Structure formats: C-alpha cells, structure tokens
Amino acid sequence: MELHPNLVPLSALLGDFAGHGSGHYPTIPSFEYAEQVSFGHVGKPFLTYRQATQAPDGNPRHAEAGYLRVTDEGTPELVVAMPTGHVEVSTGAMTRTADGFELDLLGEVHATDTAKPVTRARRQITLAGDRLSYRFSMAAMGLDLQEHLVATLHRR
C-alpha cells in the first residue's frame, strides 16, 4: 500500500521502536520505565500510533493509541486516546534536520468526569537516524505545563 503524499516527511517513523525513559512530576514520585512504540499506515493521510510502557519489574504502566496526521499545508496534528480517560488533540510544527526531523506539538487534553485533571500537553519528538527521543510535558493537577517524561527509543 502506497504512503499518502502528506506523510512522506514522516515516513522514517514507520516501524517499531523500543527503549527506556524516566518520569517525574511535583505530585508523584520519580520513576523509570521501558517503552515500545509502533507507527504504521493504511494509505490514508495519517500514521497509526501505538505505545505501551512497563515498570522495571515488567508490570504494565501506561498505554495510548492514536493518529499522527499531516495537513495539506504540512502542519502535523496528533490525536491520542488513553485508558486514563484522557484524549489529547495537538498541533505543531516539523523541522527537518540533517538525519531526521523534530516535531513540536502542543495541545489540549480532554478528560472524562472521573479522570485526573490534565488540561494541556506538549510533545517534543526528535527522530535522528534510528533513534527516537521525546520530552512530554503536561499541565495537570492544577499546575502549569512542565516536563513529565523523557525517553530514548531505538528502531527494532
């Protein structure tokens, strides 16, 4: 199946990545995790996205799934659903680099009535060759936007 033309700039994301990260936030203890991320496509103007993390002892921690879109004007858009009761809708910019690109996505987080209060999210994603790294910031629990997660993953 042919990749939609809007997605050509993101084609290097296609495939599976795995690695490790760390998390921190003023309202919780710091932690470490292992992560797996997959990007795929079905010929439409979006990439599919699946993510799952595990604690060092192997127990599941977090998972999310969604879509990374690129508009006709070249603007990246991300829609992600989480089992915590949150849905993130972000837009941003893509900058090409010598060996990949950087995405900077900022958006709103919508929550169910029973979800913890999270209102904003920012994802700074860098693909350099076969290395995918990111910083995830959030505004949650009444606090302003601040860094929560940092990880480095490698293509499998």
Image (spheres, helix red, strand yellow):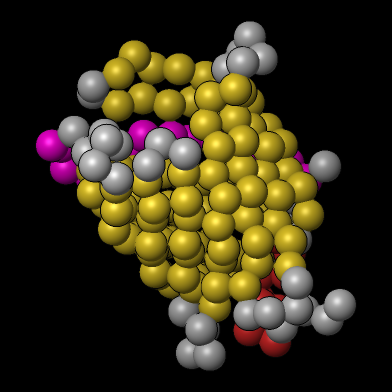
Q: Confirm whether residue 47 shows in the render.
A: yes
Q: Which of the 4 image quadrants contains residue 144?
A: top left
145 drawn magenta? yes
Which residue is at 57% across, 50% downward? 65
**Measured from the top left, where is residue 89 in percent x and y?**
38, 62
**Measured from the top left, where is residue 11 in percent x and y?**
73, 70
15 drawn magenta? no
41 left or right, relative to 114: right
Which residue is at 59% across, 30% downward? 53
**Measured from the top left, where is residue 1 in percent x and y?**
86, 77
Furthest residue to the left?
Answer: 142
> Is 53 drawn above or below residue 113 in the view shown?
above
Furthest residue to the bottom?
Answer: 72
Give 43 or 102, whichever is nearer the viewer.
43
Stretch of the chain drawn in magenta: 142-155
Which residue is at 27% across, 35% downward? 114
Which residue is at 47% across, 62% downward? 79
> Is 147 drawn above or below residue 14 in the view shown?
above
